[in-house]
Image (spheres, rainbow, N blue to C red):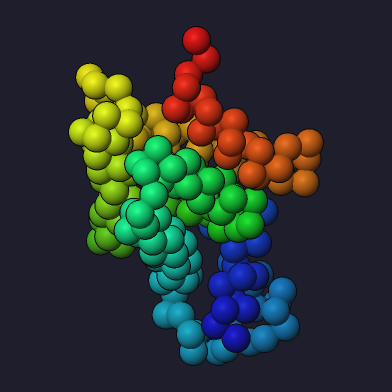
Amino acid sequence: MKQGIKQQSILLFEKKGFSETSIQDIVEALGVTKGTFYYYFTSKEQLLMDIHLGYIDDLLERQQKIQQSQLSNRKKLEQVVALLITDIANHGPSGKVFFREMRHLCEENAVEVKAKREKFRKNLERIISDGIAEHEFRQGLEPEMIAFAILGVTNWSYQWFNPTGGISADRLAGIYSDLILNGIA
């Protein structure tokens, strides 16, 4: 039931926004009582935090597997880009809630989520730095700025990318990886 509450809430938050979705909306959509909701969550904000932590913890875990692999840094970078794009395709509503509704977390919770987001970015920077050190990427790059650029390109895709449209998630990930790794020279 807890997972069902989360999934229904994600869909409602995506459609109506966090502020415009009431606990009553959530329980009515599920056909349960408010007591059921409060059995699993103390508040709507705790539910939002649970959604955020589930989303970022899953990304960090999958990113860590990529980092620990024996792949080249170039391939690791391609896989992180693919991870982010396929995640939008597979979990689009969760991504929208994650990026759009973080502003509704209390300061303490926002700090925790931001720290995990920063860890993801720092892990990406490490791949880029290692690639520069191992001469897979050109010298003189600024890993921090490249990581921000990669995250900007990939994370913004949740706003417009339609996985059932003309381009698949794998194809979009390939386009982005080519752009990032080879530029448009």
* Residue 107 location (% of width, % of height): 27, 56
Instruction: Evaluate whether residue 170 shows in this view.
Output: yes
Q: Quadrant of residue 168?
A: top right
When the figure is inspected, residue 24 is found, relative to residue 147, above or below; the finding is below
Side (left or right) of 177 relative to 90:
left
* Residue 149 location (% of width, % of height): 39, 29
Instruction: Evaluate whether residue 63 shows in this view.
Output: no
Q: Residue at x 73, y 37 (%)?
A: 167
When the figure is inspected, residue 39 is found, relative to residue 83, above or below; the finding is below
Q: Residue at x 45, y 47 (%)?
A: 80
Quarter of the image for the N terminus: give it. bottom right
Q: Residue at x 21, y 33 (%)?
A: 133
* Residue 176 location (% of width, % of height): 54, 32
Side (left or right) of 170 relative to 80:
right
Observer-nearest of 54 and 50: 54
* Residue 89 location (% of width, % of height): 64, 51
Q: Quadrant of residue 129?
A: top left
Q: Residue at x 63, y 37 (%)?
A: 172
